[in-house]
Amino acid sequence: MSHERKIKWLNEQRVIYRQMPVNDTPTLETDKYMFFENGTYEHYCLFNTKAKITTYKSLKWHFLVLYYLNQDQGLLPSHVYEFIANKDNGFVTFFISDKKLQSMIDDVFNTGGEPPKNKLRKVIFKEYNMLDVSEKLKIVGRLIGRKNMVDQESIYQCMLDMNDLGKKITWGRVAGLLNCSTRTVHRNLNDSLRNEKQLLNEEI
């Protein structure tokens, strides 16, 4: 049986799990989104979709992000990490032993603090923007594809945005966003993009 994510508990504990870019300046900004021509690594937005944490590696990354985002308020207590790692609370899909979990938490406490490795993002939608998924995808297509260039970077950015919006990635949808043919997308694919598509879709 699938457990609903108990995000309300994190909010009650005042845990910070989202951060808009703080140092990078957007190329274009409206009341609904920010666009970074060269991308930004500073956008952290955990638990934004229904996708759950499926691996130890992903769980540790989430812990490192939580440590980083909350360090100015003081260290998060261990029970916050333990709550997230408890399968019954709806954040993860697997069981982790107490010993392995404690080792992971200790490692985060010892090595955390620096910005964790993150994916480059170009289009970031603001909270409470009132846009539906279709409208967001149109904006992504207009901004990412505005140079009429179809390359591996633009394809990857479209993939990330679709995943962030909880949409299954297909090459047809990518082509639609980039205003090109599916054949053009296929010409620019490599094994890395194909593998990433599979991994991202498994999160949905």
Image: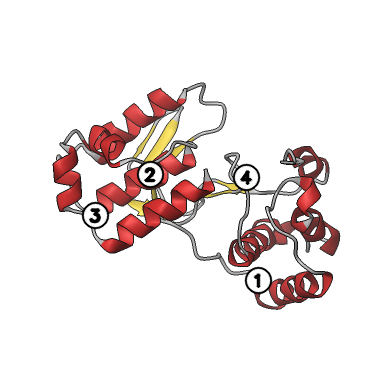
State the mark number for residue 47: 4
Between the residue at mark 1 and the residue at mark 4, the CA separation in whole angstroms equals 20 Å
State the mark number for residue 112: 1
Between the residue at mark 3 and the residue at mark 2, the CA separation in whole angstroms equals 22 Å
* Residue for point 27% across, 34% down: 177
Q: Say whether residue 11 is visible.
A: yes
Between the residue at mark 1 and the residue at mark 3, the CA separation in whole angstroms equals 32 Å
Of residues 23 and 204, the one nearer the viewer is: 204
Query: Closer to the camera: disc 3 or disc 2?
Result: 3
- Please say if the residues under marks 1 and 3 sit with CB atoms less than 8 Å apart: no
* Residue for point 60% across, 63% down: 61
Q: Position of residue 55 (x, y in %)?
A: 61, 62
Where residue 68 sits, quadrant-wise, is bottom right
Of mark 1 and mark 2, the one earlier in the sequence is 2
Query: Closer to the camera: disc 1 or disc 2?
Result: 1
Of residues 162 and 128, the one nearer the viewer is: 162
